[in-house]
Image (cartoon, rainbow, N blue to C red):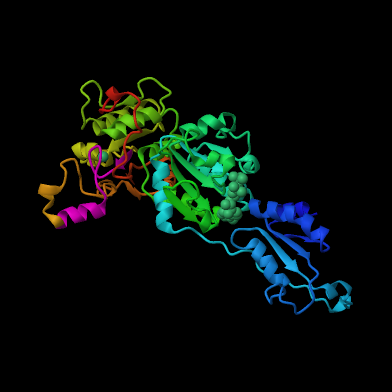
């Protein structure tokens, strides 16, 4: 009965109640109570035989408290001792007033600086892995965890009772390669799973010696058990996962996020013109071409300053040959600087070109506005700013609006999706979408050292 009552607690989030007689009843219920406690499942056991007003009865042993204790904080078993004469008491049924004895557990979120840190550790991981435990199942975090898995394309591994939080047949489930996934991961995020024997205590040889753990748990005492985590997130799994999702999108985008959202919307027959450093290199691998002679970029000279002229040519050719066909010109911010004044030409001829400026405040890498400000305060920018830096957060879209075209300044994937949709629907006007990305964003690490330079 106590095993059954504890499973009710796990499945419903409210404690099951197990009523036992004293002596053998309570003794045999102990197994179920221990099991509930170690599983972090709420359970109330009512038993006891002590006389009223004896030492063993404290004022706290009352029912509403028992429910609260079993489900608040880390869930677990709670024992209520009732005095012997309760068993034979007469109660008038009508006088019983059932009230909701306690509210659902309060939902706590993790510290926001820890969430930012966790997101940046996940972002810089080469082989990240999410481990989904029964805490995630109990927390009903399936919706948010699935979103995180899918939006960030993260592989996941369920523990035995974490199975099904995200379905086992999901493409990102690495359950079939469990040992290998644990062994090769460089960052592991624990969603309500303890580093106990089920997860080999988080230690080598089952894990990389320098693997970084990010631990999400509602129980502070659990954080840091067996290994020293890189980041600890104390809070409710569902709430913390939502925090991570929010912080992921409010942080500056990187090249891959930008091109992923651009690729989703580009018409298959469009011309793609591109120039820049990382913008062109990374863009080429993500943006697809389906037709011959529809991509124009730095070419044999590997030069810059050619893109906007190419885009104008492509738009004029398209206008003649197949009206409605679009030209999308993907420029780095420094590449745009070579011939940005062609916005005037584009507006003068009223060519509905869509110019995307992928703006990282520099050539290869820039700095953010705060760092720039500190550099300028420290000494004048001409001497301290690296020569590859451009002014941070420049409003290139205003170069387009200066001549009557449409300009968009975007910082989030949602803004990018929306502005690109509008630009594609607007077949009458040129547009420029200025997309701010992380200034330090780079290509993903290359496996071959000869690929680490640009234009390759
Ligand atoms: P598994 O056996 O699947 O590895 P464990 O029982 O070891 O899972 O770990 C479950 C963890 O989930 C416990 O440490 C518990 O404190 C935690 N937990 C339970 N409910 C929540 C919740 N709502 N939010 C965050 N952590 C929770
Ligand atoms: Mg740049």
In the figure, is residue 392 to the left or right of 435?
A: left
Q: Position of residue 438 (x, y in %)?
A: 32, 45
Residue at the spot 36% in from the left edge and 24% down from the top edge: 294
In the figure, is residue 1 to the left or right of 117?
A: right
Placement of the C terminus among the 4 image quadrants: top left
Q: Is residue 101 visible?
A: no
Q: Name the quadrant containing residue 101.
A: bottom right
Q: Is residue 364 magenta?
A: yes
Q: Position of residue 164 (x, y in %)?
A: 65, 41
Q: Point out the quarter of the image occupied by ligand 2.
A: top left
Q: Name the quadrant containing residue 132.
A: top right
Q: Nearer the viewer, residue 341 or 46?
A: 46
Q: Position of residue 146 (x, y in %)?
A: 57, 43
In the figure, is residue 328 to the left or right of 234?
A: left
Q: Position of residue 445 (x, y in %)?
A: 34, 31
> How many marks are shown on the rendered structure?
0
Placement of the N terminus among the 4 image quadrants: bottom right
Q: Which residues are magenta?
A: 355-377
Q: Is residue 409 magenta?
A: no
Q: Does residue 108 lie above or below 100 as drawn?
A: above
Residue at the spot 78% in from the left edge and 60% down from the top edge: 26
Q: Is residue 307 visible?
A: yes
Q: Does residue 206 lie above or below 394 as drawn?
A: above
Residue at the spot 82% in from the left edge and 64% down from the top edge: 22
């Amino acid at each position: 009965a106590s095993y059954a009552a504890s499973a009710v607690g796990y499945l419903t989030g409210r404690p099951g109640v197990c009523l036992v007689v004293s002596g053998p009843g309570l003794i045999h219920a102990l197994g179920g109570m221990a099991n509930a406690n170690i599983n972090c499942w709420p359970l109330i056991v009512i038993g006891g035989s002590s006389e009223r007003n004896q030492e063993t009865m404290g004022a706290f042993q009352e029912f509403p408290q028992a429910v609260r204790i079993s489900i608040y904080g880390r869930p677990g078993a709670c024992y209520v001792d009732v005095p012997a004469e309760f068993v034979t008491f007469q109660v008038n049924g009508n006088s019983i007033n059932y009230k909701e004895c306690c509210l659902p557990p309060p939902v706590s979120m993790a510290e926001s600086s820890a969430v930012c840190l966790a997101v940046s550790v996940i972002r810089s991981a080469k082989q990240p892995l999410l481990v989904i435990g029964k805490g995630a199942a109990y927390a009903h975090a399936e919706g948010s965890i699935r979103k995180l898995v899918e939006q960030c394309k993260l592989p996941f591994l369920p523990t035995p009772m974490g199975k099904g939080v995200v379905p086992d047949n999901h493409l990102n489930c690495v359950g079939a390669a469990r040992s290998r996934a644990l062994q090769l991961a460089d960052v592991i995020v624990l969603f309500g799973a303890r580093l106990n024997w089920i997860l080999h205590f988080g230690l080598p040889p089952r894990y990389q010696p320098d693997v970084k753990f990010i631990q999400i748990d509602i129980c502070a005492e659990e954080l840091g058990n067996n290994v020293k985590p890189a980041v600890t997130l104390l809070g409710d799994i569902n709430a913390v996962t939502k925090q991570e999702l929010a912080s992921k999108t409010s942080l500056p985008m990187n090249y891959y996020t930008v091109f992923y959202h651009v690729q989703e919307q580009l018409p298959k027959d469009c011309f793609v013109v591109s120039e820049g450093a990382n913008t062109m290199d990374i863009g080429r691998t993500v943006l697809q071409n389906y037709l011959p002679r529809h991509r124009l970029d730095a070419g044999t000279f590997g030069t810059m300053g050619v893109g906007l002229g190419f885009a104008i040519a492509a738009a004029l050719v398209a206008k003649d040959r197949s009206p409605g066909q679009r030209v999308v010109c993907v420029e780095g911010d420094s590449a745009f600087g070579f011939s940005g004044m062609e916005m005037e030409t584009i507006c003068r001829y009223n060519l509905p070109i869509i110019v995307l400026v992928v703006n990282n405040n520099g050539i290869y890498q820039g700095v953010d506005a705060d760092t720039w400000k500190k550099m300028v305060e420290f000494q004048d920018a001409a001497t301290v700013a690296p020569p590859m830096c451009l002014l941070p957060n420049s409003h290139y879209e205003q170069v387009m609006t200066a001549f009557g075209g449409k300009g968009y300044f975007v910082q989030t994937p949602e803004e990018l999706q929306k502005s690109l949709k509008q630009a594609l629907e607007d077949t009458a006007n040129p547009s420029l979408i200025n997309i701010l990305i992380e200034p330090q964003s780079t290509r993903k690490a290359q496996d071959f050292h000869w690929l680490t330079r640009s234009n390759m």
